[in-house]
């Protein structure tokens, strides 16, 4: 039997870290994966984003603690289904987590401090060439 999830996506918020009573480091974060699906009725592609709860332990949690919102991560690991009892209502609640065996940051978050310009703000400079410089 095989219980394996492989995901590539962007971290959706801060990575939170804690330490268990036994001293094991734990890191939790959400991961967004997006696929495009063709809608035959509209003739357009529609994006579908899914959110996954990720829980890392030990050395992988230590590595994940340096990651930040927007970083692109690739991982593979086990899908875990858990439940708890809501203390206020007494209702049983269910949730799913991915516990990676391996994960790697493959891209950093977008740099939102970098200067940007709209096409109207970009001033193109004319290029002067002698007719003999043309490649054709």
Image (cartoon, helix red, strand yellow):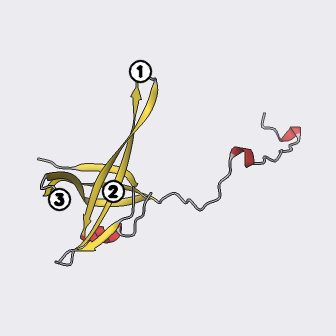
Judge whether 114 appears above or below 133 on screen.
below
Labels 1 and 2: the sequence-earlier one = 2
Q: Which residue is pictured at 44% across the width and 31% down the height?
A: 45
Look at the numbered disc 3 and give the secondary structure of its residue.
Answer: loop
Q: Which residue is pictured at 14% across the width and 57% down the height?
A: 84
Q: Which residue is pictured at 15% across the width and 55% down the height?
A: 89
- Residue 109, position as x, y percentages in the image: 48, 59
Badge 3, how many Cα within 10 Å: few under 14, some, many 20+?
A: few
Distance between the alpha carbons at the discs numbered 2 and 3 = 25 Å
Look at the numbered disc 1 and give the secondary structure of its residue.
Answer: loop
Labels 1 and 3: the sequence-earlier one = 1
Distance between the alpha carbons at the discs numbered 1 and 3 = 44 Å
Q: Which residue is mark 1?
A: 41
Q: Nearer the viewer, mark 2 or mark 3?
A: 3
Residue 8 is tagged as none
Q: Which residue is pictured at 28% across the width and 55% down the height?
A: 53
Q: Which residue is mark 3?
A: 88
Screen quadrant of the C terminus: top right
Q: Which residue is mark 2?
A: 30
Question: Image quarter for residue 40?
Answer: top left
- Residue 120, position as x, y percentages in the image: 73, 44
């Amino acid at each position: 039997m095989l219980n394996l999830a492989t995901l590539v996506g962007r971290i959706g918020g801060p990575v939170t870290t804690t330490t268990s009573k036994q001293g094991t480091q734990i890191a939790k974060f959400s991961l967004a994966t997006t696929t495009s699906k063709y809608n035959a009725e509209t003739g357009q592609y529609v994006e579908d984003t899914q959110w996954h709860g990720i829980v890392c332990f030990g050395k992988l949690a230590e590595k994940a603690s340096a990651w930040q919102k927007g970083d692109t991560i690739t991982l593979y690991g086990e899908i875990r289904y858990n439940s708890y009892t809501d203390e206020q209502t007494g209702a049983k609640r269910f949730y799913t987590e991915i516990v990676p065996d391996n994960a790697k940051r493959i891209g950093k978050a977008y740099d939102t401090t970098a200067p940007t310009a709209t096409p109207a703000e970009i001033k193109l400079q004319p290029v002067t060439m002698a007719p003999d410089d043309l490649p054709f």
